[in-house]
Amino acid sequence: MSLFDRIKRGLQKTQARLSHEIKRIVTRSPKLDAASLEELEAALLAADFGVRLTTQIVEAVRRGYETQGRSGLDVFEIARREVQAAFGDQDNRLVRAPEGLTVVSLVGVNGTGKTTTSAKLAHRVQEEGLQAVLAACDTFRAAAIEQLKLWGERLGVPVVAGRYGADPAAVAHDAITAAQARGADYLFVDTAGRLHTKNNLMQELQKVHRVMGRKLPGAPHEVLLVLDATTGMNALNQAREFHKAVSLTGLVITKLDGTSRGGMAVAIQKELGLPIKFIGVGEQADDLQPFDPAAYAEALFAE
């Protein structure tokens, strides 16, 4: 299955809803009047495109109608173009340190899929011929440590873990030592889920990053916030607070296959200016896909 087909399959719920609504709005009347544009706006907002991008799309459709008339108007093409343009030309590739080990920290609230995402990223780089190590730094949940170990066994990726309740910063420190000893290219650090409103937990995350930076200057080289697409625009507040605390370098959007509000990825990227590095469109190891703005826009507004 091609990258586009995977993304299209993952965005099927959002695409089906948008396609139905747009077709209903534009075929109901030979004119595209103010009421129709309001309905288009409501449909885009319901898919969580956010106010700024929704306004841009609606305005572009209105201008297109004024210059081309109803017969020459392709709302789907206009929406695709505006969504793709919203992402700009940011670099969506995974960061690689100039030499030696690259450390990637996965952060986010509980239940977004950080542990699974860590394992899938390790799998991706190993598929590219690089060596990866996983660090189980969610020491508050014994289940998280075991889950990461199971993923490691399944995918053939070494896992560095401490005991339940251990200091996560100490585990991260030891993981860097172990990854360097193995000559690994990447270390993916699975941190504990934490509410962005809990200052003490955010300070602990900052400590983990400080300890890694002292052990390996420049680490973590990549800080990826893992967001659950099913939470819609509520994820924007999470992104803002995590970005303040630990200077995010990118986003991973998971569970896009389980929501009809797939527009949230565009809205959050537009609001924060952070590149979306990967999107999750299924449960399998290879269902974490590099983000492609053109394929994403095309899949969202496929007729």
Image (cartoon, rainbow, N blue to C red):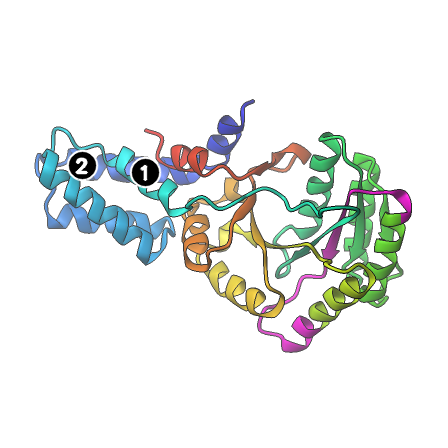
Is residue 198 rendered magenta in the image? Answer: yes
Tell me if I can see residue 140 in this picture. no
**175, above or below 33, in the image:** below
> Residue 166 appears in which quarter of the rendering?
bottom right
- Spatial CA span between label 1 and label 2: 18 Å
Q: How many discs appear? A: 2
Residue 299 lies, in percent from the top left, at 41, 33
Residue 185 lies, in percent from the top left, at 78, 42
Say which residue label 1 marks: 81
Q: Are marks 1 and 2 in contact (CB under 8 Å)?
A: no
Horizontal arrangement in the rendering, residue 124 relative to residue 245 (left or right):
right
Horizontal arrangement in the rendering, residue 84 relative to residue 155 (left or right):
left
Residue 45 lies, in percent from the top left, at 32, 53
Residue 232 lies, in percent from the top left, at 45, 54
User: Residue 113 or 297: which is nearer the viewer?
Assistant: 297
User: Which one is earlier in the sequence, the residue at label 1 or at label 2?
Assistant: 2
Q: Residue at x 41, y 40 (%)?
A: 14
Give the structural element (helix, strand or loop) at label 1: helix
Residue that extends furthest to the top in the rendered view of this protein? 1
Tell me if I can see residue 10 in this picture. yes
Residue type marked 2:
Val
> Residue 94 appears in which quarter of the rendering?
top right
Q: Residue at x 66, y 71 (%)?
A: 202
**65, above or below 112, in the image:** above
Say which residue label 2 marks: 26
Residue 35 shows which numbered tag? Answer: none
> Residue 124 appears in which quarter of the rendering?
top right
For the record, the magenta segment spans 181-203
Task: For the N terminus, give its image quadrant.
Answer: top right
Q: Residue at x 53, y 30 (%)?
A: 6
